[in-house]
Image: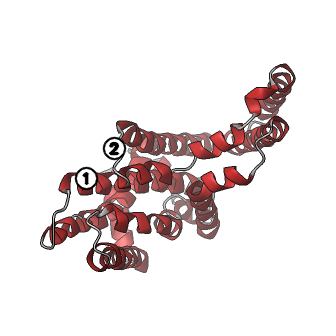
Amino acid sequence: MLAIYKKEMRSYFTSIIGYLFLAFFLALLGLYHYLQNMYGGYANFGYALYGMRMFFILLVPMVTMRLMAEEKRQRTDQMLFTSPVSISGVVFAKYLAVLSMFAIVMIISCIYPFVMTKYGQVNLKQAYMEILIFFLLGAAYMAIGLFISALTESQAFAAVITFVVVLVTSISSGIGGIIPSDSKTGWLFFALLFLIFCLITYLIMNQATISFMIGILGEIVLVVLYFIKPGIFEGAVQNFFDCFYILGRFDNIVYGILDVSDLIYYISISGLFVFLTIQGVKKRRWS
């Protein structure tokens, strides 16, 4: 596992990707820090991070697109599958490598609140809690990028899909707000969503019969619910999109609302997608 971790870290610093990520992130963070905290006079370092959060749309695909896809393209994944390291160890090593890249810039960002104390009073406890939750936010997005990279051998395709997913989860609350909240629209939305879920299940498991049966049963349940209790679908679309508004949890801490559930939320997303990546790779190994 350590050897794979070192290999991944070496690959970031023997190519331009690692340096681009570090330079781009630090340059933007420095700019937002100057505009919000130094020039703007705001004592809350979270405002600088708040401006940075939308750039995950570009930064996450940059560092995650090659994690698993490159191994598949070069057929070196077969060597990993036959190595003494378990599939879980391989996936964790790659995930820890990309987290280490992100941790470097977050550790450097810890300097900024101390700089701000030279010019006024700063709530250091809140500042470092904001940095922690911002790191967990990035960790969640990178776990999603890792999972998407494991689904394809094309780095470009992985980057595009990751870009779309991060974008949608960044603006999902606004998307839910423009969709009608009546029960019929909600029912149609979830019927379509369940079909997409079945398609993803088929792509991961490669079991057409199981995916088809799940789809049929799910659609029957949705139809029965609609005719028995249609009110359950009213406003359900907005609630659904709010659940996927990943940035919302970070916004809470910026405005001074600290909730342990926010930490659990981001850690759970990271754990879920790392687990899905492991299961997807295991399935491909035995196919």
Q: Is residue 287 visible?
A: no
**Where does the image place residue 266, in percent across and percent down from the top left?**
43, 45
Q: Specify the quadrant of the image occupied by residue 37.
A: bottom left
Mark toward the start of the polypeptide (1 vs 2): 1
User: Which label sits on residue 258?
Assistant: 2
Q: Specify the quadrant of the image occupied by residue 52.
A: bottom left
Structural crowding at the residue carrying mark 1, measured as other residues with C-alpha within 10 Å and reported as few (<14), some (14–19) or many (≥20): some
The residue drawn where x is 59% and y is 64% is: 163
**Where does the image place residue 279, in percent across and percent down from the top left?**
55, 39
Q: Amino acid at mark 1?
A: Gln
The residue drawn where x is 41% and y is 49% is: 252
Name the one closer to the observer, 113 or 17: 113
Check whether the beta carbons of the residues at disc 1 and disc 2 lie within 8 A of each other.
yes
For this orientation, the residue located farthest to the left is 118
Q: How many marks?
A: 2
Question: Which residue, given by chain and number where applicable, does mark 1 sit on?
Answer: 126
Does residue 235 sit above or below 103 in this rendering? above
Q: Amino acid at mark 2?
A: Leu
Left/right of residue 196 with respect to residue 160 in the rendered view? right
**Where does the image place residue 278, in percent across and percent down from the top left?**
51, 42
Q: Specify the quadrant of the image occupied by residue 159.
A: bottom right
Give the Cα separation between the discs numbered 1 and 2.
9 Å
Locate the C terminus by quadrant: top right
Considering the numbered disc 1 on the image, is that residue within a helix, a strand or a loop? helix
For this orientation, the residue located farthest to the top is 228
User: Which label sits on residue 59?
Assistant: none
**Where does the image place residue 190, in percent across and percent down from the top left?**
76, 38
The residue drawn where x is 19% and y is 70% is: 116
Considering the numbered disc 2 on the image, is that residue within a helix, a strand or a loop? loop
Q: Is residue 45 visible?
A: yes
Does residue 284 sit above or below 104 in this rendering? above
Name the one closer to the observer, 235 or 78: 235
